[in-house]
């Protein structure tokens, strides 16, 4: 029998989303019985006296909750888009990302409607 638990199981699949000061990791991992689960990790770079460190928060999502989780996330995002912020063109964020990936620098206008996220 092993003396230690393998809490950081091998990743089967991984996606990374960079979002300003945060990075989100979506990782598929397997259990010893070859079942699969998802970990969602938020990583934030923080400054401390002797330099930088990464603060991480992790969510474990199991297969029986996948559909409920995705449905709740979609419902919540759609509520924000349609009910709370219908005037915002959310596709602009996709266009800015595509432009940045092509090496084009984009500058947002400084009008009052610009959103600023932490």
Image (tube, helix red, strand yellow):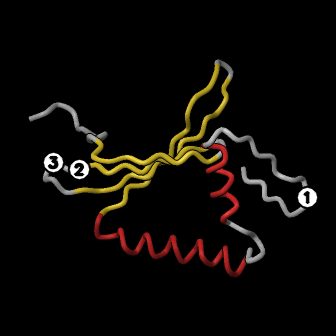
SS type, badge 3: loop
Circle number at residue 30: 2
Local crowd at mark 3 within 10 Å, few (<14), some, or many (≥20)? few
Local crowd at mark 2 within 10 Å, few (<14), some, or many (≥20)? some
Residue denoted by label 1: 111
Q: Which quarter of the figure has residue 60?
A: bottom left
Does 70 sit left or right of 45 as displayed?
left
SS type, badge 1: loop
Q: Residue at x 83, y 59 (%)?
A: 114
Q: CA distance from mark 3 to mark 1?
A: 54 Å
> Which-is-in-front pick, marks 3 and 2?
2
Q: CA distance from mark 2 to mark 1?
A: 48 Å
> Which-is-in-front pick, marks 3 and 1?
1
In this view, the residue in front, 99 or 115, is 99
Q: Are marks 3 and 2 in contact (CB under 8 Å)?
A: yes
Residue denoted by label 3: 32
> Which-is-in-front pick, marks 2 and 1?
1
Q: Residue at x 8, y 35 (%)?
A: 1
The image shows residue 82 at horizontal and vertical percentages of 67, 80
């Amino acid at each position: 029998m092993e003396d230690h638990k393998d809490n950081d199981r091998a990743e089967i699949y991984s996606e990374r989303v960079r979002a300003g000061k945060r990075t989100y990791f979506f990782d598929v991992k397997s259990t010893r019985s070859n079942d699969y689960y998802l970990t969602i990790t938020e990583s934030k770079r923080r400054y401390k006296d002797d330099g930088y460190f990464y603060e991480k928060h992790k969510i474990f999502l199991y297969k029986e909750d996948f559909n409920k989780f995705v449905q709740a996330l979609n419902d919540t995002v759609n509520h924000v888009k349609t009910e709370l912020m219908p005037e915002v063109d959310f596709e602009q964020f996709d266009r800015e990302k595509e432009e940045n990936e092509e090496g084009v620098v984009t500058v947002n206008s400084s009008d009052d409607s610009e959103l600023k996220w932490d």
